[in-house]
Structures are given as C-alpha cells and as structure tokens.
Image (cartoon, rainbow, N blue to C red):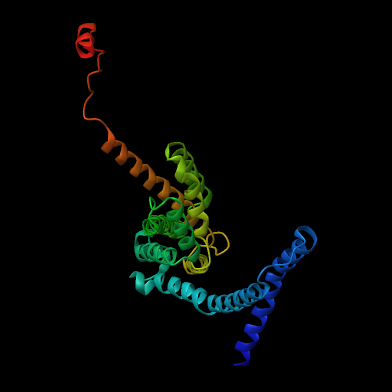
Amino acid sequence: MNEALSVLGTTLRDTILALLPIVVLIAVFQRLVIRQRLAEIRSIAVGFALVLVGMVLFITGLENALFPLGRAMAQQLTDSAFLGVGDAAAASWQDYWAVYAFGGLIGFATTIAEPALIAVTKKAQLVSGGTLSAWGLRIVVAFGVMVGIALGCFRIVNGSPLPAYIIVGYLVVSIQAFHAPRSILALAFDTGGVTTSTVTVPLVAALGLGLASHIPGRSPLVDGFGLIAFASLFPIMAVMGYAQIGQRRSRRRGAPQGRAAPARAPSPQVRTSQEA
C-alpha cells in the first residue's frame, strides 16, 4: 500500500511539473498580452484538475499494465517451446509467424481505440459534410498500422536495418502524394501522427523492446525501437491509397460510354422555318 502511494505521489509530482509551463504561459499571456480576465475561470480550474487526475491515473496504469503486458506477450511468443524448436537460436523467421500476427492485430486494435484518432476522424467527417466516414477512416488507418507493425516485427526478427524500410516507405509516400487527391493529403499525414498516441505507443514500444530482448542476436537499443516509425508511416500510405482507389472508381463510373457526335448549328433554311 505504501509503495503504491509512493508511486502515485511521484507520478503526481511529475505531472504537475509537466502541466505547470502550460498554466504559466496562459496566465502570462492573459495578463500581459491580452490583458483580459479568463471567462469561466472556475470551470477551467476544474478542468485542469480533472486533466491532472486523469494523467496521473493513466500514467500509473501504463506502468503497471500495458508495459508489463507487452513484455510478457513478447516473452511468451518467442519462447522456444512455443516456437516448437529445441533452441531459439535455431529458429528461422518463418517460425515467428505468431509474432507477426499478434503485432499486426494488436496494432489494429489499439489504433481503433486511439482517442486522438477518434477526434480527428470525427472532425474530418464533420468538415467534409459526411463525405468521409469517421468509422471508415478509422478502419483504413488501423489497417495501415496493422501492416506496419507486422512488418516492423519481421524487421526485428530478421535483423534488417531500419533505414532501408523507412527510406523506401517514404519514397512510396512521396510518389503517392503526387497522384492522390489534394483534399486528402493533409489528413493522410495527420493520421500518421495521431496513431502514435496514448494507447498505441506504450504497448507497441513494450512489444518491440520485449522482442529484441528475447530473440537471440538482437539488441534492445538497436533493434527494439522503430515500431513507432512503422505505425506512423503506413497509415499515410493506407489513407492515400484508399483515396486513390475511390478516385479511380468515381472516374470509371462517370466516364462516358462513347463519344457523342458534336452538335451542328442549324442550317439557314431550318432557322428561317423556325423563326416563321
């Protein structure tokens, strides 16, 4: 009990220090620049208190639930008995198929539950007048994260260099950016950022570090990090690819079946008869 209270006290202190610059900045601007009192200051104070409590509980939950869960799953999935080999050092990359499947599915599930992504997709649906579906966009982004995390787990297992994947990925993104609809570009790049937020990052980071710690020949510092980069890159590709597919379908539906003969101006005789 005393240990839990000590952890909560330390987290509370760190969270207050993290929020203090925001409070000071707002107070200074209101006093010296805007020179007006804040409206509904009591409501704002209560909101900050709730943010403080929520952050303390959330950070404590991460440390005691998501991080240990990611490490435990990585340890179990890379165990030689689970892989069906006598020695983990003799396992090939095909033996780790469950790691790729779990990494991809956990990436999909955490992205669907990501609060930042939910907020962005709702705003996108509102601004587009319902043209963009919030749920459809979330599924597309989650699919991109799923593919990215699965490929990132393969990179850790295989020991491939991270820069090669990232360089090729951004080359693909650059090419897509020239062909994707202009209206989707900014949103596609934003979805790459909001996917790496409060729910996805802790579990994915713990999974990567756990894999690198339990796979023979891998270094947690060199190979354990990098999954977040995949989770940021592949949603951009997924959203732009989805927009490109929709654009091509709309062009095919709106394409004319055949060329109509050009309309000819009526002859002078016809004109005269019509005028008469």
Q: How many marks?
A: 0
Q: Residue furthest right?
A: 32
Q: Residue at x 68, y 70 (%)?
A: 19
* Quarter of the image where one finds residue 49: bottom right
* Quarter of the image where one finds residue 137: bottom left
Q: Residue furthest bottom?
A: 1
Residue 52: percent from left, percent from top: 63, 76
* Above/below status of 256 relative to 232: above
Residue 234: percent from left, percent from top: 44, 52
* Above/below status of 23 relative to 188: below
Q: Nearer the viewer, residue 219 or 98?
A: 98
Instruction: Identify the image quadrant of the N terminus.
Output: bottom right
Instruction: Identify the image quadrant of the C terminus.
Output: top left
In-image side of 88 versus 63 (left or right): left
Q: Nearer the viewer, residue 220 or 33?
A: 33
Residue 219: percent from left, percent from top: 54, 63
Q: Residue at x 38, y 53 (%)?
A: 130
* Quarter of the image where one finds residue 265: top left
Q: Say whether residue 85 is visible.
A: no
Q: Say whether residue 164 is visible.
A: yes
In-image side of 28 versus 123 (left or right): right
Q: Residue furthest front?
A: 276
Residue 221: percent from left, percent from top: 58, 62
In-image side of 266 versus 176 (left or right): left
